[in-house]
Amino acid sequence: MSEAANVKHWQTLSFRDADAMIAWLSAIGFTEHATYRDERDPSVVVHAEWLWPGGGGVMFGSERPDGVVKNIGGSAAYLVMDDPDAVFDRAVAAGATVVREMVDQDYGGRGGSVEDPEGNHWSFGSYQPS
């Protein structure tokens, strides 16, 4: 197996309302690996790692003045899965806004896009880039 085949993608984000986004990430299929909160203010997520079932995941924390990641204008991620329609539907039901409806792509696979409640762009598809 090549070294590239072992690399898993990790998106890094910061959220204005980490608890609301934790609920949204759970709704679309991410699972918690670790979530560390500020001891003085438990509403602040200092660092979190949530896993995607197909591999990789997201690392995130609450937006804060000393934070490294600034999502000015939002961020974007593409998630690969066998049934993108189901995840797309769960994302919309959990509060996402449709950007691009699910369609069969000319280059193969099926995909669509949404914006999460904080304006980040998420694409869901069955196309696996090589």
Image: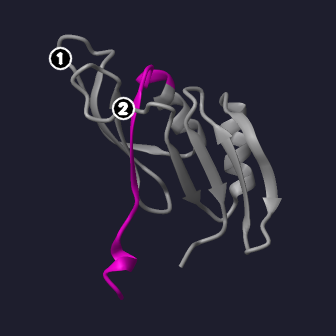
Check residue 26 for magenta coloring. Answer: no
Residue 40 on image: x %, y %: 18, 11
- For this orientation, the residue located farthest to the top is 40
**Where 111 falls versus 49 (above or below)?**
below
Viewer-side label of 2, 1: 2
* Left or right relative to 107: residue 76: left
Tell me whether the residue at label 2 lies in contact with that at label 1, contact meaning CB atoms closer than 8 angstroms. Answer: no
Residue 82 on image: x %, y %: 66, 65
* Residue at disc 2, secondary structure: loop
- Split into 4 quadrants, where in the image is the N terminus? bottom left
Between 48 and 103, which is closer to the camera in this rendering? 103
**Where 97 falls versus 125 (above or below)?**
above
Q: Earlier in the sequence, mark 2 or mark 1?
A: 1
- For this orientation, the residue located farthest to the front is 73
* Residue indicated by mark 1: 39
- Highlighted range, magenta: 1-20
Question: For residue 89, what is the image quadrant?
Answer: top right
* Residue indicated by mark 2: 70
Residue plotted at (67% across, 32% down): 96
Residue plotted at (30% across, 19% down): 44
